[in-house]
Image: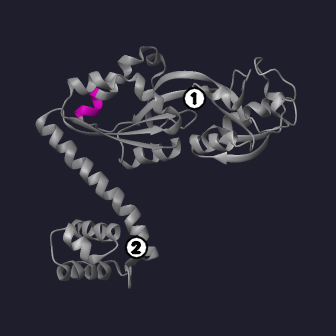
Amino acid sequence: MTFLQLKYFLTVAEEGQITSAATKLHMTQPPLSLQLRQLEDSLGVKLFNRTTKGIELTAAGRLLYSHGTQILTMVNNMSQELRDVAHGTSGTIQVGIISSAVNLLLNLDLYSFCTQNPWVAYNLIESDTFSLLDMLDQGIIHVAFVRTPFSSKEYMSFPLFSEPVVAVAGRAYQPRGGLIGHDPAEPITLEQLAGEKLILLQNYENTVLTACQQQGIKPNIICRGSNATVAFLCARSGMGVMLTPKNVLGPDADRDLQVWDVDCGVLTSSLCMVWKFNRELPQAVDKFILHVKERFPSGQAGER
């Protein structure tokens, strides 16, 4: 398999038709079809099923497409980084950010960074913490903004700030245990949540379970979510009570939500900027990391 064949395959898979893929690749259909047959022969698997509507990927084709898109992204990133070395600060910074922290972008003073580095472009990818760390491992992104907890052994981590955790539910939710009749203006304890239906973020579950175990509490977890936005919508619908960093809530949250501060020192959430340990980064990315550090100087004490 050659890189050119992989590029042809990905284009055909995205177009769904060999004819339109050939047009996009500025070539005729016969040589493109020949390259695809040679690719299948070299791999020893069938990648496409021909239908009256075009082509469909086989199981092997879907697997190659998944890995192939990542390979193409890494090759493009490498090519850009090599150009950066030759021409100075330019290229594209690949940035990952979790859904619950998109408001952070307003605090990074990106305008001044863009002004000082006019030849730098940005690709922003929104996902959950675990997926973003996986993208860091594979070299798909350069830097990510994620929440603790996560294993930090393979990453450089710069904590930006910590924030308290709150319990939140939609107005339709009917408290079952310690929340019955509780004044929302007063903090609640973890023990008061013992009888409630809980919604947790997957990367935060171990922290909650550890805190519950320390207090001899068995939580009733009815829903786990990898994405903060989706989990928050479940809570808003009245499904249960979500434990979440306060920053996830919007300024008008009190209008259609029940919100309680949680009095438990263990339940805090830290937002961190992370990048891969011992990996050479493009000059533009190094400048971007330094820029963020300068905007959050208090975080330097926790850098590792």
> Could you say where residue 144 lies in the image, as x and y percent from the top left?
42, 36
Quarter where residue 143 is shown: top left
Instruction: Specify the principal SS of the magenta part.
Output: helix
> What's the distance in space between the residues labelled 1 and 2, CA to CA?
42 Å
> Could you say where residue 250 lies in the image, as x and y percent from the top left?
57, 29
- Say which amino acid is labelled 2: Gly
Q: Does 285 lie within the magenta span?
A: yes
The residues colored magenta run 283-287
From the viewer's perspective, tell me whether residue 165 is left or right of residue 292.
right
Quarter where residue 110 is shown: top left
Q: Which quarter of the rendering shows the C terminus?
A: top left
> Could you say where residue 131 lies in the image, as x and y percent from the top left?
49, 47
Is residue 285 visible in this depiction of the protein? yes
Residue at 57%, 41% in the rendered image: 229
Identify the mark at residue 61; answer none if there is no mark.
2
State the residue lying farthest toward the front: 255
Question: What SS does tag 2 mark?
Answer: helix
Identify the mark at residue 250; answer none if there is no mark.
1
